[in-house]
Amino acid sequence: MFLLNLSLGELLGLFAAASGVLVALYLLDRSRRRQAVATLRFWQSADRPSAVRHRRRIQQPWSLALQLISVALLLLAISQLRFGDPDAGTRDHVLILDTSAWMSARGPKGVLMTAARASALAYLRALPERDRVMVIRADALATPAIGFESNRRVLARAIAQSRPSSSALNLPQAFALARRMQRLESRQPGEIVYIGAGRIPRTDLGQVAAPPNLRLISLPPPGDNFGLRRLTVHRAAEDPQLWEISVAAHNYSRTAQTVRVGLLFAGAPVGTRTATLAPGEEKIIDFRYRNRSGGWLEARLLTADSFPDDDRATLEVPSEPSVPVTVFSDDPDSFRPVLAANSWMQARFERPSAYHPVESGIVVLDRFCPDSLPVVDSIWIEPPINRSPIPVRYVEHNVALARWRSDHPLAAGLRTKDLRLKQTEVFAAAPGDIPIAETDTGPIILARPGKPKMVLLGFHPERSEMRYELAAPLLFANTLRWMAPELFRRRELSATTVGGTTVTFEPDTDLAGLRVTADNQESLPYTLEGNTARFFTATPGTVRVQTGDRELVYSQILPQMADAVWLAPRQARRGIPSASTAGPANRELWPLLALLGLAGLVLEWQLYGRGRLPSAPAAHPAGRSEGMKPKRPRFLTRRRPPSTARRAS
């Protein structure tokens, strides 16, 4: 026997206070009664009242006892008296509620998440009132929604606030968390209940260890589903204005499906493809689209299924960048082949006599120096000796190019063997200048970083012996890449699913400056094994992977759909338990105690209540003798000893 709401001391204290008040009221009950008499002539005056000692005693002990018993019963009802051991029959259960992306699918009875919440509430109703339940929301990360709690309203609120996420279910992690919480915080472990669709990644099938106290409440399977897994866009290598688009579609159904995939740019249809997918098959569907401007690219499944959230993927495609290059030269034909090879360059050729200040882009100055230095990045070809922005020490003839600064981007990939120049200028480098190419006497190609950037060549690559070398066009390309790196950055845009992402780089990629950043420019943790990087995100967003001249943009907007079905072991209990099998329960006694207490108070009022005043006695009949004296009521007569005079008479 134990009390649920009050301790024994609290119960005894309340009962002592209530019983003390009742006993005091019974002892202090001195109420008067009205008595009708014939006349006041029979009253005798007294010189002084006689002292009367009243014995303090309870006039109606059975009434007091009945009231005390009724109060005791009401206090026991408030305390919720229970029989048995307080801990006996009280178990702690863990309810794992599947909140993965699959719970947004539609089944025969509606959305799976709605059915899961209804099943969870039905399980709570089947449990004894004193059993505690912990709710865990399980998707890619298993997180407790509420600790062990017996208040059903609090538990129902936590269940009602559960929503499907965008990630797949990590069932091994959810089972491990449930077992750990029962081991650490439960008094008497109960069941571990899983309510969900049972869809997990195929790689997790061999890692699921079902607990021995598992109960499975399965949901009706959804209908056929097929969705997009990835949308990838990148510029074609042979034509920068041509977009190469790849759409990956996956069939999650158990039967073959024929799907139609449509491609839209800026809301206008640009292509449609049809593909047949076997059960569990994933197929790549390719598109090509020519466009120089930017806009929204959308891939859409045109075949309806039970899960519409993965039927649409969008990407914001940036416009093709371009940089104006203004060439002031009397021999523009020597620059046309180099600049025409890059479609991102908007070359304009003018005579040195028509020089004017350029406010944007890159300026190429061929063998002349303007009155004022350019305010933008500039390339100087054989600047005048007396007006060069960097002093020229002297001019050398028939000199061999000794070495390149191969660790600098301007000289990346440049190799020359036995190259001799008929004539070249040798510059006097200042602190901070970077020698790119040198002879034995000094630098002949010099770079000055800062704003604006400046590159000086002591010879003309297209009018010297270097024009027969591969180093000539590479030198111009490296110079333009150093001044405008955004033109040469290779971008690859992908709309993918949330969760884990694997990026494989080319074997010669320099991964020393690898950066993985999120929308807020904060770095994301990643692992790097060889040329493969892996990172994880649990919520939709955009992740940028940058290394060297390559930028990969992952717009993780698609839900992560698991492609395998987990089957619970045969010994696991299934379904919602009945009240008889849910475990031992303590019967509620407070309603019966409250009814008995109220019945006792009502009975006491009927038997001993003083709500009615006694009726007046009947009047004397008219024919009664006048000499007959009425009998005086005892409690209205105050007797006194007779006086001495009356005794003498």
Image (cartoon, rainbow, N blue to C red):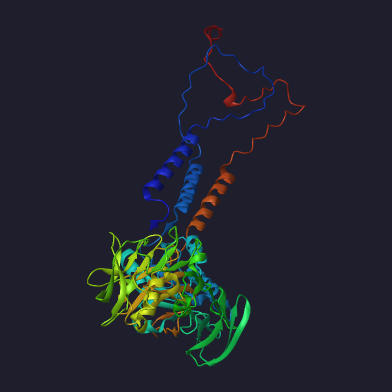
Q: Position of residue 65 (x, y in %)?
A: 47, 44
* Residue 495 makes an appearance in the image: no
On the image, which quarter does residue 34 sit in? top right
Report the residue at 63% width, 78% height from top. Answer: 268
Locate the C terminus by quadrant. Answer: top right
Judge left or right: residue 187 versus residue 161: left
| Viewer-closest of 339 and 641 | 339
Q: Position of residue 431 (x, y in %)?
A: 28, 59
Locate the N terminus by quadrant. Answer: bottom left
Q: Position of residue 583 (x, y in %)?
A: 41, 71
Q: Position of residue 37 (x, y in %)?
A: 67, 25
* Residue 458 makes an appearance in the image: yes
Figure check: 634 above or below 234: above
Judge left or right: residue 183 versus residue 648: left
Figure check: 530 above or below 145: below
- Farthest residue to the right: give it: 622
Figure check: 230 above or below 392: below
In the rendered picture of this protein, how many numbered marks are placed on residues? 0
On the image, which quarter does residue 92 sit in? bottom left
On the image, which quarter does residue 463 sit in? bottom left
Judge left or right: residue 624 versus residue 86: right
| Viewer-closest of 277 and 86 | 277
| Viewer-closest of 537 and 577 | 537
